[in-house]
């Protein structure tokens, strides 16, 4: 799914952290899907919003909540990405919440797998949003600012 020439099997993530302490974006992780990624094969975009239950002084999640989010992300990646049904492409960490952006092949399959993966014990503080985006416009609006190789080459 990537054209990462150093190791094509390994995803390449870019992380951007905000230095200023204000109410804006704190951290963004963007997966470099490569210049030839077939967005039309992943036309469904899902946003999973995790509202933080325990905040520190900067409005970021507690260590326990970070562990729960990591476990959730890992479980969901295992369920979604094993057969390329969906791909986690961005993770935003902002004051009071984290947002996971997924590109999926099929809307109902994604929702069914999410329900299966959500069985990690207690009810999770998440909400789900969906839009069709067959051109990858949402992803590209962020990735082209962050991942250099996605920018068009100068003619």
Image: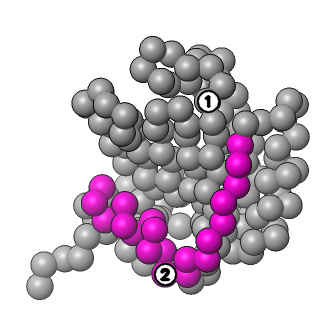
**Height in image: 54 above or below 78?**
above
Q: Is residue 58 left or right of residue 85?
A: left
In the picture, the disc for residue 19 is: none
Please state the horizontal and vertical placement of residue 25, each as a whole percent of the image. 38, 41
Measuring 61% from the left and 77% from the top, which residue is drawn there? Answer: 132
Viewer-closest of 83 and 93: 93
Please state the horizontal and vertical placement of residue 106, each as a whole percent of the image. 74, 74
Mark 1 is surrounded, within 10 Å at the Cα level, by few (under 14), some (14 to 19) or many (20 or more) other residues, namely many
Measuring 70% from the left and 49% from the top, which residue is drawn there? Answer: 127
Viewer-closest of 148 and 10: 148
Q: Tell me the magenta residue range.
A: 126-146
**Height in image: 65 above or below 130?**
above
Mark 2, secondary structure of its residue = loop
- Residue designated by label 1: 52
Viewer-closest of 119 and 47: 47
Task: For residue 55, say whether it is visible.
Answer: yes
Mark 1, secondary structure of its residue = loop
- Residue designated by label 2: 135
Of the numbered discs 2 and 1, the one sitting upstream in the chain is 1
Q: Quarter of the image holding residue 122? A: top right
Measuring 79% from the left and 53% from the top, which residue is drawn there? Answer: 114
Residue 21 included in the magenta stretch of the image? no
| Tag 2 near tag 1, CB within 8 Å | no
State the quadrant of the C terminus.
bottom left
Mark 2 is surrounded, within 10 Å at the Cα level, by few (under 14), some (14 to 19) or many (20 or more) other residues, namely some
**Height in image: 140 above or below 32?**
below
Q: Is residue 112 left or right of residue 104?
A: right
Q: Is residue 13 left or right of residue 76?
A: left
Please state the horizontal and vertical placement of residue 86, each as a whole percent of the image. 67, 64
For marks 2 and 1, give the CA distance: 31 Å
Residue 137 included in the magenta stretch of the image? yes
């Amino acid at each position: 799914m990537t054209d990462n020439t150093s190791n094509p099997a390994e995803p390449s993530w870019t992380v951007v952290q905000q230095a200023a302490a204000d109410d804006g974006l704190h951290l963004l992780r963007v997966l470099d899907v490569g210049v030839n990624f077939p967005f039309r094969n992943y036309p469904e975009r899902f946003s999973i919003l995790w509202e933080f239950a325990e905040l520190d002084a900067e409005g970021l999640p507690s260590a326990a909540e970070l562990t729960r989010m990591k476990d959730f992300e890992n479980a969901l990646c295992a369920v979604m990405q094993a057969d390329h049904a969906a791909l986690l492409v961005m993770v935003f960490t902002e004051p009071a919440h984290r947002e996971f952006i997924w590109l999926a092949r099929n809307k109902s399959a994604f929702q069914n797998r999410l329900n299966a993966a959500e069985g990690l014990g207690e009810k999770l503080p998440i909400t789900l949003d969906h839009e069709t985006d067959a051109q990858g416009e949402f992803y590209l609006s962020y990735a082209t600012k962050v991942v250099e190789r996605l920018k068009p080459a100068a003619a």
